[in-house]
Image (cartoon, helix red, strand yellow):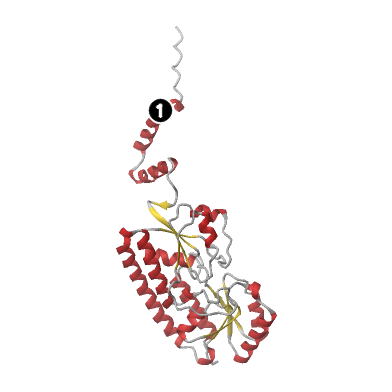
Amino acid sequence: MPAAPPARPRRPWRRRPRHRVANACISALAAALLAPALAACGNQAGQAPGSAAGRPKVLTSFTVLADMASAVACDRLEVVSITRPGSQIHGYEATPGDLRRGRGARLLLRNGLGLDRWTDRFSSRLGRLPQVDLSEGVATLPIEGAASGVNPHAWMSPRAALTYVENIRAAFSRLDPPGAATYRRCADAYAAQLRQLDRELAGRLAALPARHRLLVTCEGAFSYLARDYGLQEAWLWPVNGESELTPQRLQRLARTVRERRVPAVFCESTVDGRAQRRLAADTGARWGGTFHVDSLSGPEGPAPTYLALMRHNVDTLVRGLAPAAPAR
């Protein structure tokens, strides 16, 4: 029997025209996968990064502002925080990863009042990205030791946060005029939640007796909340962190805690609370717990949103300062 003719060699796949490969791939994709595939093709062709599903990207300097901005954006914009949950934002040093996440952004929202000046350099490295100070228009409070002379933690008041929300709405409407009606509707809805939060916090804090209305924290971050709800405050350092703690400040605060018989002292999540715990042990005060101020906690923690952050802080404060129940 004559030998069978040799099989015809198969043409190498790499020689097929590229457009035929693309057509074959696209025709095989399910409809649900078609849009992502085309988006990937667009990026490979040199499309500038910086948007998700065609949404303009907006950066914020820290996670609390990102949560507020997301509530106003209502998914029309992609909102990204430069810093991650748990970051100390005073004097933050941006990383190469931060810069990569920021590529293609159209706007940067920051607190202002001297808190996040590091965004000037960050913005310049992204081509002088426009910035908006969300605290613009807030009735500010002074604080000893701050470089600007102003306490920058204005978002710690739900009443001041209403100004932040209006500034976010205005900034988004300038960035994306066709979405102005959406931003107005979402800002109004979020403002209603802030007003409800204000009433809720006022009611809870009104129950504290006068002798228990001194809030002792690591950082002077609660001036705006104290102003709104009739509290007093004392702290180990003003705004920039534990490096500003001095023996004189520690001794002065310990004397205040003893003289006022403060039942509990607190600290913030982004700073070292060991000095405050020592102060509690030395003065007979209780360790009251940890506040969230400069950063959200992440989704599994007690402060995954700004509204939850404020409720967590006031719950912690009231538990620590409320009079002890009489013994039975």
Q: Quadrant of residue 107?
A: bottom left
| View extreme (right): residue | 247
Residue 123 horizontal/vertical position (percent) = 50, 58
In the rendered view of the protein, which quadrant contains the N terminus?
top left
Task: Compare residues 279 and 164 and report the one nearer the observer.
Answer: 164
Is 180 in front, or is 124?
A: 124
Within 10 Å of the Cα at label 1, are there few (<14), some (14-19), or many (20+) other Cα atoms? few
- Quarter of the C terminus within the rendering: bottom right
Please name the residue shown 68% across and 82% down the image: 248
| Residue 238 can be seen, yes or no | yes
State whether residue 74 appears in this view.
no
Q: Quadrant of residue 285?
A: bottom right
> Which residue is under mark 1?
17
Residue in front for this viewpoint, 179 or 207 = 179
The amino acid on which the numbered mark 1 sits, given as a three-letter code, is Pro
Q: Secondary structure at mark 1?
A: loop
Which residue is depicted at the point 57% across and 69% down? 270
- Asked if residue 260 lies left or right of residue 109, the reply is right
Q: Position of residue 38 (x, y in %)?
A: 38, 42
* In the image, farthest residue toward the top: 1
Considering only vertical position in the picture, is 24 above or below 117?
A: above
Query: Foreground: 284 or 76?
Result: 76
Side (left or right) of 269 relative to 17: right
Estimate the x, y position of residue 102 in percent, counting from the top left: 49, 55
Residue drawn 35% across the image and 43% down it? 34
249 over 190 or under it: above or below: below
Question: How many discs mark residues in the rendered view?
Answer: 1
Which residue is located at x 58 percent, y 87 percent? 263
